[in-house]
């Protein structure tokens, strides 16, 4: 778990590789659903939010597909208390459980600064956190994401905090939370996660 700009997307890939986990990402699921499911497509086209049941069903299906000798990592889910409770029910049914909940802790002011520096390549999705102008992968011109514009950034972080901090508290009460200082370099954060999980 981590707010927009916390480095979650980078760290989840490192963790997946380190522990050889199946990645179950709610972002991928949403994209996939919108392509395959007519009702989901219609809702998204009309600018609506995908109801929880679509994502929950897809996640439940993915979890049931993970074989016993494999673990999995959930990315971008659960985002609300309701989702966390539903996840617990699903896992019980699948005779599975959560070992750890990693939370990347970054002060709000730092998140705003980080997101205002972020640029992406429109051609290959490369993400840059520095002032470079050209994509080192494909040579494309880096651009600011629409939702990384300053006035939107603050709102995104507020929405995240409001919905997701209760989820962090929920897992803390269950003794599952590993809070990691996310205000360090990518490698230092990855190392702290490894140490806390081992
Ligand atoms: Zn590129």
Image: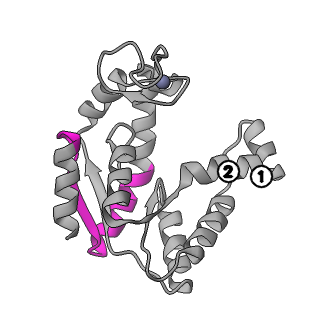
* Vertical side of 7 occupied by 98: above or below: below
Number of marks in the image?
2
Mark 1 residue element? helix
- Residue 112 included in the magenta stretch of the image: no
Whether ligand 1 has any atom under 8 Å from the Cβ at mark 1 is answered as: no
Crowding near the residue tagged with mark 2, few <14, some 14–19, many ≥20 C-alpha atoms within 10 Å:
some
Q: Name the residue under label 1.
A: 36
Question: Can residue 40 be spotted in the picture?
Answer: no
In the rendered image, residue 67, in percent from the top left (x then y), is placed at: 52, 79
Left or right of 177: which side holds 137?
A: right
The colour style of the image is one colour
Q: Can you tell which mark lies on residue 32? A: 2
Quadrant placement of the C terminus: bottom left
Mark 2 residue element? helix
Residue at x 59% of width, y 65% of height: 59
Crowding near the residue tagged with mark 1, few <14, some 14–19, many ≥20 C-alpha atoms within 10 Å:
few
In the rendered image, residue 85, in percent from the top left (x then y), is placed at: 50, 72
Instruction: Say which quarter of the image contains residue 134.
Output: top left
Between marks 2 and 1, how big is the CA–CA gap? 6 Å
Left or right of 152: which side holds 63?
A: right
Q: Are marks 2 and 1 in contact (CB under 8 Å)?
A: yes
Left or right of 176: which side holds 71?
A: right
Residue at x 33% of width, y 22% of height: 117
Numbered range of the magenta stretch? 163-186
């Amino acid at each position: 778990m981590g707010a927009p700009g916390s480095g979650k997307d980078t760290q989840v890939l490192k963790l997946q590789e380190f522990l050889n986990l199946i990645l179950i990402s709610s972002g991928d699921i949403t994209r996939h659903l919108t392509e395959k499911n007519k009702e989901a497509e219609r809702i998204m086209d009309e600018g609506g939010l995908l109801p929880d049941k679509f994502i929950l069903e897809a996640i439940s299906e993915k979890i049931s597909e993970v074989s016993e000798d494999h673990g999995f990592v959930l990315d971008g889910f659960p985002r609300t208390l309701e989702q966390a409770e539903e996840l617990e029910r699903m896992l019980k049914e699948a005779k599975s459980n959560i070992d750890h909940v990693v939370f990347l802790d970054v002060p709000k002011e730092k998140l705003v600064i980080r997101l205002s520096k972020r640029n992406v390549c429109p051609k290959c999705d490369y993400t840059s956190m520095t002032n470079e102008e050209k994509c080192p992968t494909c040579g494309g011109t880096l651009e600011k994401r629409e939702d990384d514009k300053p006035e939107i950034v603050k709102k995104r972080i507020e929405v995240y905090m409001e919905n997701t901090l209760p989820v962090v508290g929920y897992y803390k009460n269950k003794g599952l939370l590993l809070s990691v200082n996310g205000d360090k370099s990518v490698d230092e954060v990855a190392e702290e996660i490894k140490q806390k999980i081992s």
